[in-house]
Image (cartoon, rainbow, N blue to C red):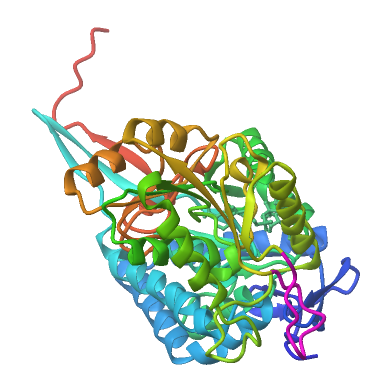
Amino acid sequence: MRAQPPASHFIDGAYVEDASGEAFACLYPATGEVIAQLHAATPGLIERAVASAARAQQEWAALAPVERGRVLRRAARLMRLRNRALSELETLDTGKPLQETLVADAASGADALEFFGGIAPTINGEAIPLGRDFAYTRRVPLGVCAGIGAWNYPTQIACWKAAPALACGNAMVFKPSENTPLGALKLAEILIEAGAPAGLFNVVQGMGAVGAALAGHERVAKVSLTGSVPTGRKVYAAAAEGMRHVTMELGGKSPLIVFEDADLEDAIGGAMLGNFYSTGQVCSNGTRVFVQRAVRDAFLERLVARTEAIRIGDPMDENVQMGPLISAQQRRKVLEYVKHGKAEGARCLTGGGVPKVQGFEGGFWVEPTVFAGVRDEMTIARDEIFGPVMAVLDFDDEDEVIARANGSEFGLAGGVFTRDLARAHRVADRLRAGIVWINGYNLTPVEIPFGGTKMSGVGRENSRAAIEHYTEVKTVHVGLGPVESPY
Ligand code: NDP
């Protein structure tokens, strides 16, 4: 088996197997071949993982922050040194082309470890003068955090959650998506090698039930989920039972607005990045592309030409630009949406089918697809598809497009292409979204906050903002004089 790990789980500093857990296979999405056989964590293993995390957390939180930071920065260096091997594994795990994984997965994870390792010693409270008395605050860790990941960026998601959690003095038990169990195990190995105490970052595999066990576990203080809105609802509710903190990074149906004065080649490039990268399996994708009517035809003509030039094929070939979807089930779902689009009257300008990829006949391929003439009420303009299906809609003026762009239950991201500086900022201000890109799309460097509003989630990942979601404030009031008691 091409990517069989030594065992399914990583608990208390070592690989652990318990074959009594439900068996599941990890497939290479480009061929459909089984590349690893794993077992879901049993309740006993989940207990072991949480208990070892609780132990490690005490030891870890007692370290000087600069020492914690050093471990994270060492882990970042190891990830960078092994970028190629980690990227190849990520490609096997997800089917994403090496061209992407070499720059966007372990590399982004390393950035998070480096960034949060760097700021660990700066996580301070404040001193508050009160006249004679004073108070001070500290940012204290929450304890054991549970991380639950989606399948589109398995390594990145594990790092985006672990890095701030650990920097703040927490421990983490992480459950990857059952589709992509491999990347997080490598992070667990690397953290141990970098000097983290055994148990600080544990990985337990399994389906939704394992995630649910963590989200409702009495010793878990915080749950951070990257996933869909329906799962988010369940996890948020389970966490609420125990008054646990949450970060919810959920889905989207984000608008990308192209005004007639935009640089059209840039706008087309942004729209393609925001719909086709990772075969469209990106939560912040700009899947409703609003194009001002005067430039619509020119936009569509070049968009179709550039889309038809996308190189689909062997994900391990660095010249290949698009891989398959994650699973047969996801492909069925995406093709179903294509059918809806056609049936509801949108015009499919290119794609919509399953490409023949020689030597990779068992893979979960789908063509990059562009629909024009899409109207707001169509299914493909409302639902998150999570595949390479772009919906292009026409608009006439700014007020109209803002109202339509905001007319979604989601609010993760948005984009605007224009050369008019004032309009760019005005639109950015009026879009109800956690992040807006002006003349660009889907850039998520670790220095900037990332997360959604409305049904797209709560909390922010990356940047200093993440610190607030992995700590709580403790206040100490210091009395310096006699106690003034009326009794
Ligand atoms: P799911 O919501 O299906 O699953 C997310 C994770 O939650 C998986 O590990 C899953 O396990 C687990 N899970 C499922 N049910 C439960 C439960 N009841 N309690 C606890 N955990 C549970 O999402 P997908 O994996 O299908 O990922 C795609 C979705 O993720 C899209 O909607 C996308 O928009 C969103 N996403 C959001 C991002 C963001 O940052 N906002 C980034 C990336 C994706 P398993 O699948 O193994 O059964």
Q: Considering depth in this image, is 292 or 219 the residue closer to the camera?
A: 292
Task: Read off the magenta span.
Answer: 353-366
Judged from this view, the residue extending furthest toward the top is 487
Q: Considering depth in this image, is 192 or 259 the residue closer to the camera?
A: 259
The answer to if 110 sits in the magenta stretch is no
Residue at 49% across, 84% down: 102
Percent coordinates x, y for residue 259 in the rendering: 32, 48
- Quadrant of ligand 1 in image: bottom right
Q: Is residue 108 left or right of residue 3?
A: left
Percent coordinates x, y for residue 169 in the rendering: 43, 60
Percent coordinates x, y for residue 459 in the rendering: 45, 45
Examine the rendering and report whether any part of residue 446 can be seen: no
Taking 230 as reference, is 389 above or below it?
Answer: below
Taking 324 as reference, is 430 above or below it?
Answer: above
Q: Is residue 11 left or right of residue 226?
A: right
Judged from this view, the residue extending furthest toward the right is 20
Magenta-colored segment: predominant secondary structure: loop
The answer to if 363 sits in the magenta stretch is yes
